[in-house]
Structure formats: C-alpha cells, structure tokens
Image: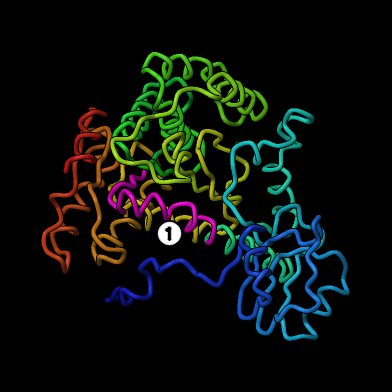
C-alpha cells in the first residue's frame, strides 16, 4: 500500500530569497555590485536602461529566460562563472514567465483576428504542431521551463493571500466543462462563486468553460448586486456553446468590458497588498492539453500549464478549504478520487468539506458517495466521512464551506 511522502517534501516553503523576478529587484541587487549565487528569471535585460554587467560578480549566478543586448553579453557572463539558459527561439510563449497570465494577455489578438489569432490559440496551435502531449526534446524543455515559471509565479501570487487568510480560505470548484451558459447548472455555479467571493474565499477552478467559467464569473462580479450577475449570464447565454469559439469569446469580452472598472468588494479583513485579483474573479488553472476549449476569461489570474498532471495536482493542493463538485462526467469523477487520495493520506494537510451539488446525480446517476464514505471512514487520521456533504442548495453549500 502506498504511503504519503514526508511532509517537508510537499509543504509550501518560504519564499526563495535568491530568485530575482522583477527589474526593480534586479536593479537593487545590481547596486550592491554582486549577483553571485542568485537566479535571475525571465527579465528583459536588453531594454533601456541596459545594465552594465561587465564588472559585476556573477559567480554561480543563473540567468534563465533572460534577454540580453547581444550574444556576447551572455557569453561573457558564462566566461565569468555564470550559468545562462537563454529563451528558446521560435516559441510563441515565454520560457520563464515572471507572472501569471491575465485574461487580456490570453485574449490578445482577438480584436484583430478573432479566436484564431488570440495568444492562447496560437500557443495551442504550436503545442499541437510540436507533438502535443508528447513533444520533442527541444519543445519539452521549453514547456518544462514555462511550467516551472508558472509554478513560481503562482506561489508568488498566492503567498500574500494565504498569509492573510490561511489555506482554509481557498475553495475549489469542479464540474462539467460542457454545461451551457444560461442553463440552471451554469447559474447555480455562478451564484456559488459570487457567494464564496463575498464570503472572502478565493475561488479556484480548472479554468475551462461550463461550471468552471461560471464559478469564476460569479467571483468576477462579486462586488455587484445579484441582479447584475443574472444580467451578465443573460448576455453570455446568446453564445451558450463553447465550440462556437468566436461568438463564445466575443460574449465573454463584452461582459468584461461592461463591468470593467466597477466597484471593489469590501473585505472583512485588512486587505493584503497585491491580492485584489483574488477578490475579482479568483484563480483559474487550465492547461493547453485542453486548448480546444476557449479560455476562461473571468478569473483574476490564470496559471496556464502545458502539463495537465501538474495542473491537476496544483488545483487540489491549493483547495484546502473544501471542494465543490457540480455534476460532471469522467474528468470530474477523476478529480473526486484524486482529491480523495490526498485527503485520505493527509498529503497536503487538513482538507475541507467535499460538497456535492445535486444529490440525485451523485447518489443515483454516478453514485460516488457510496464509494467515498467507506473510504474516508478508513482514513489513517480517523473517520473523515463527516466531511462529505450532498445538497441541492447553493447557499447550503456556501454555509458548509464558510462555517467557522
């Protein structure tokens, strides 16, 4: 029987103080005359003011994904003891992104050329053209560097929120990607996201359409009255099917534009700096493995990966405040038991509630509950079956997830 890894292997670590990810931090270190032992990630060091590195100590410095004013600059750094992993040429994505994606970044190009010219779509086309899930060595290295950069950026983006609110404030929402906009299930998921964000919870989804988009939409409009959430869904419902890529994306962008610059959501706690996005859309963690699905454009930040395995584990590792499972098929069922493995072994620490929306669906159509309860009852940490809740009421789900 497998056992969980030691806690220190998987628990979040302190910030890596030797990693430099912004030009401001780089300039501060540079002023001290040494970059020795540091890791400099994804910076444009070819832009004015171009730094003079000739007399700077770079012993053991790692420059990864940085751009220099010329090849000789990088070669000189290597001669003086640095390690340089330059950006890969010919890639439409950064090999070391320094921040999480925004909706505007993924949608860039839509206004000029529609869905086919969006950044998100062009990266997916490149992904497919270079082997998809089984890329060649060069592409695989580029993708792994990109995903490591996203890992880093995600840790940076969530650190302040977790410090202020704790890991139990992060709630995952899972469910079917094919749920059409405007449907009862879509509206329920949107109200769920709206209620959770208003209760100071960070909503995390898999970043796809359907239930996932609805939950992020609710969080995106949490500062607005419920009537505006209904109105926004009505606008989106004119393009209900995600396979109608251009209309689907255009409707999302129209809603974003309509509610841009709206009210901010007051927090019952002092607001942590840099977390405004968390309370205006929450977090989405999608993958280009499912790049045929349009990007979910309502999340405040988007951690988009090439590796689906990393992405799945990351969602479940973050969602320590509980997970809502709306009706879904094989993918959702997979997530139920992947999450259950972590809870059973306490892999990531204490888990929150497992809330299954639609009692009949989860007890009759896909009777997950009958398998999950005896499994949780046998956990090494005692009977955890009390964490399982079935309900048909969104507000009951929110009550369970925000209790205490």
- The image's colour scheme reads rainbow
Is residue 161 within the magenta segment? yes
Is residue 247 within the magenta segment? no
Which quadrant: the N terminus? bottom left
Q: Quadrant of residue 244?
A: top right
Region of the chain picked out in magenta, as a range:
152-173
Label 1 sits on a secondary structure element that is: helix
Query: In the image, 348: left or right of 274?
Result: left
Foreground of the two, 130 or 201: 201
**Residue at the image position 38 percent from the left and 23 percent from the top:** 187
**Residue at the image position 73 percent from the left and 65 percent from the top:** 66
Image: 234 above or below 98: above
Residue 70: image location, x then y, percent: 88, 67
Which residue has dot 1 on it? 313
Residue 85: image location, x then y, percent: 72, 73
Foreground of the two, 39 or 393: 39
Which quadrant: the C terminus? top left
Residue 13: image location, x then y, percent: 40, 69
* Residue 173 in sight from this viewpoint: no
Image: 319 above or below 81: above
Q: How many marks?
A: 1
Image: 271 above or below 61: above
Badge 1 density bin: few <14, some 14–19, many ≥20, Cα 10 Å = some
Q: Quadrant of residue 21?
A: bottom right
Foreground of the two, 36 or 70: 36
Residue 338: image location, x then y, percent: 35, 58
């Amino acid at each position: 029987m497998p056992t969980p890894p030691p806690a220190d292997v998987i628990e979040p670590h302190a910030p890596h103080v030797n990693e430099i990810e912004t030009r401001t931090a780089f300039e501060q270190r540079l002023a001290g005359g040494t970059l020795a032992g540091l890791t400099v990630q994804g910076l444009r060091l070819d832009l004015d003011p171009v730094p003079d590195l000739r007399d700077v100590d770079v012993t053991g410095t790692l420059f990864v994904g940085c751009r220099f004013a010329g090849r000789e600059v990088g070669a000189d750094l290597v001669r003086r003891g640095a390690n340089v992993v330059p950006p890969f040429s010919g890639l439409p994505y950064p090999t070391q992104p320094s921040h999480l994606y925004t909706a505007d970044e993924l949608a860039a190009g839509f206004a000029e050329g529609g869905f086919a010219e969006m950044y998100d779509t062009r990266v997916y086309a490149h992904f497919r053209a270079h082997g998809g899930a089984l890329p060649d060595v060069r592409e695989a290295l580029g993708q792994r560097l990109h995903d490591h950069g996203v890992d880093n950026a995600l840790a940076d983006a969530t650190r302040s929120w977790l410090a202020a609110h704790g890991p139990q404030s992060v709630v995952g929402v899972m469910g079917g990607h094919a749920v059409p906009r405007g449907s009862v299930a879509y509206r329920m998921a949107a109200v769920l996201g709206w209620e959770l964000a208003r209760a100071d919870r960070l909503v995390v989804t898999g970043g796809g359409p359907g239930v996932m988009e609805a939950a992020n939409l609710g969080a995106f409009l949490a500062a607005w009255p419920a009537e505006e959430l209904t109105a926004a869904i009505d606008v989106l419902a004119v393009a209900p099917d995600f396979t109608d890529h251009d209309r689907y994306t255009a409707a999302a962008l129209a809603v974003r534009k309509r509610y841009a610059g709206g009210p901010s959501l007051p927090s019952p706690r002092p607001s942590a700096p840099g977390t405004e996005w968390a309370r205006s859309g929450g977090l989405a963690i999608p993958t280009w493995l499912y790049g045929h699905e349009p990007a979910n454009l309502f999340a405040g930040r988007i951690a988009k990966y090439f590796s689906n395995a990393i992405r799945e584990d990351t969602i479940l590792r973050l969602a320590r405040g509980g997970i809502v499972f709306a009706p879904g098929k094989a993918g959702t069922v997979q997530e139920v038991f992947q999450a259950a493995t972590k809870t059973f072994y306490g892999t990531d620490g204490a888990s929150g509630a497992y809330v299954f929306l639609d009692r009949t669906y989860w007890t009759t159509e896909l009777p997950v509950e009958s398998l999950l309860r005896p499994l949780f009852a046998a956990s090494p940490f005692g009977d955890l079956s009390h964490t399982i809740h079935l309900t048909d009421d969104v507000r009951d789900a929110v009550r369970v997830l925000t209790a205490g």
